[in-house]
């Protein structure tokens, strides 16, 4: 169904309609660039932090179990932000929400960098990670809602490409992090500098977001309802579990892959970060080109196949025994984890009237993986070693394989709920 915001003029003249549609398409094109930019910057922030986890762990003398609890603070911040963001976005708009959340997130990144260079900096690290997670959670929901709106206006499936932009940011951030680790640039300089560049980029990018007021015609005003009602929708909850499984698969690599390679194969920190870079590069490839597979084979078959690919990659990382096989495993792991999150967000955001609420629910459930994952793997790592603790990810992948059915395309998705 054509949305009312595509009809800025009701004049019958063909030229007027053409001009209106052209302006709408130009606005959507600018919005696509802006959304791509904020996804990229979000990935850059996260990869900058991940690339410094081994160095901060060593500087603050954090064992595996303590590191897992420290990482929990970032996930806790995100989980606390996510449920309320569905109500905030309709009030502040996606642009206002991303701007505010970007400031909070980058402030947290700067504090984590400072904490890594201060004796007894664990309390400051906890505050920084909480702020980074809280800001990132709000940022995540708002940019996915905006991405879904751009996708509808362009009438093309492009959400995975936005998440591919996130992965590009991660690749750049991880590669830069590996280089800066190798040349021994202080952690504080790296992360504070990244925070300053990113917050400026976010503020500028949001000026090209779509207009906050999208429904001027009273006849087309969406039905008002409690934004928390989406928590009672079975399909939304099922999509949330799909996202949870793939988020756990992805997040385990984000938090632990570099550390597991360093500890399990006794290589330098830079080598561990480079392995993570292979993972993020593979995710980028999957997200940029995965739309073709989705169009041809459908969401369910693609997601279930990718779950098996991720499982094969994990087995190579854990049992490969040599760095070439580990690198191949990281590549397969990245491809396998690539589409679960963006496809889940697209499925949740199909109805513009309730997109913010449903994306908030799905993201909240999905981020439970980031809340439970770090301490769970950290606890296991304390007893069986970091590398062997990754076996738990294979168990979670079974949930992703089963829950993929919730993303099936059907008539109910194509019609407004």
Image: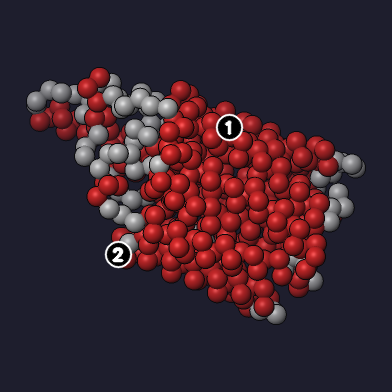
Query: Which of the two residues, 201 or 244, is positioned nearer the viewer here?
Result: 244
Picture layout, residue 180 above or below residue 227: below
Q: In the image, 111: left or right of 87?
A: right
Marks 2 & 1, CB-CB < 8 Å contact:
no
User: Disc 2 or 1, which lies upstream in sequence?
Assistant: 1
Q: Which residue bears the numbered disc 1?
A: 101
Task: Decide: few, some or many residues near mark 1? Use Cα within 10 Å; few <14, some 14-19, many ≥20.
Answer: many
Q: Residue furthest left?
A: 13
**Compared with residue 115, is residue 238 higher up or lower down, i.e. above or below?**
below
- The x, y position of residue 173, in whole percent, is 62, 52
Say which residue appears at 55% left-offset and 71% top-offset. Answer: 311
Q: Which mark is residue 255?
A: none
Query: Residue at point 71% right, 66% down?
Result: 389
Q: Residue furthest bottom?
A: 321
Which residue does the image show at 36% across and 38% down from the upper left? 149
- In the rendered image, which quarter contains the C terminus? top left
Q: Residues within 10 Å of mark 2 (few under 14, many from 20)?
A: few
- Residue at (37% x, 34% y) in the render: 354
């Amino acid at each position: 169904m054509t949305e009312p915001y595509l009809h800025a003029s009701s004049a019958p003249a063909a030229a007027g309609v053409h001009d209106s549609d052209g302006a709408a398409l130009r606005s959507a094109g600018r919005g696509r660039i802006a959304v791509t930019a904020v996804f990229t910057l979000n990935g850059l922030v996260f990869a900058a932090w991940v690339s410094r986890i081994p160095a901060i762990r060593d500087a603050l003398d954090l064992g595996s179990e303590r590191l897992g609890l420290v990482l929990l603070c970032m996930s806790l911040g995100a989980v606390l932000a996510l449920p309320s963001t569905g109500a905030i976005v309709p009030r502040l708009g996606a642009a206002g929400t991303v701007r505010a959340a970007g400031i909070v997130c980058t402030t947290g990144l700067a504090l984590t960098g400072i904490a890594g260079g201060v004796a007894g900096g664990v309390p400051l690290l906890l505050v920084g990670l909480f702020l980074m997670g809280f800001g990132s959670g709000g940022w995540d929901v708002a940019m996915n809602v905006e991405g879904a709106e751009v996708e509808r206006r362009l009438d093309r499936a492009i959400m995975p490409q936005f998440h591919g932009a996130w992965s590009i940011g991660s690749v750049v951030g991880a590669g830069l992090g590996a280089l800066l680790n190798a040349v021994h640039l202080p952690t504080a300089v790296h992360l504070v500098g990244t925070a300053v560049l990113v917050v400026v980029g976010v503020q500028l990018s949001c000026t090209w977001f779509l207009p906050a007021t999208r429904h001027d015609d009273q006849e087309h005003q969406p039905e008002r309802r409690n934004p928390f009602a989406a928590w009672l929708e079975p399909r939304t909850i099922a999509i949330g579990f799909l996202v949870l499984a793939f988020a756990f698969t992805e997040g385990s690599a984000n938090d632990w892959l570099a550390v597991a390679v360093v500890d399990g194969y006794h290589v330098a920190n830079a080598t561990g970060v480079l392995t993570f870079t292979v993972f993020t590069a593979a995710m980028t490839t999957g997200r940029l080109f995965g739309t073709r597979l989705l169009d041809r084979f459908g969401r369910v078959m693609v997601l279930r196949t990718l779950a098996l690919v991720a499982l094969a990659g994990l087995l190579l990382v854990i049992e490969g025994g040599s760095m070439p096989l580990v690198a191949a495993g990281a590549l397969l792991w990245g491809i396998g984890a690539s589409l679960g999150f963006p496809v889940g967000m697209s499925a949740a955001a199909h109805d513009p009237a309730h997109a913010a609420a449903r994306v908030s629910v799905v993201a909240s459930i999905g981020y439970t993986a980031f809340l439970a994952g770090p301490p769970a793997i950290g606890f296991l790592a304390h007893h069986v070693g970091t590398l062997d603790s990754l076996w738990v990810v294979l168990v979670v992948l079974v949930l992703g394989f089963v829950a993929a059915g919730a993303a099936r395309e059907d008539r109910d998705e194509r019609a407004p709920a």
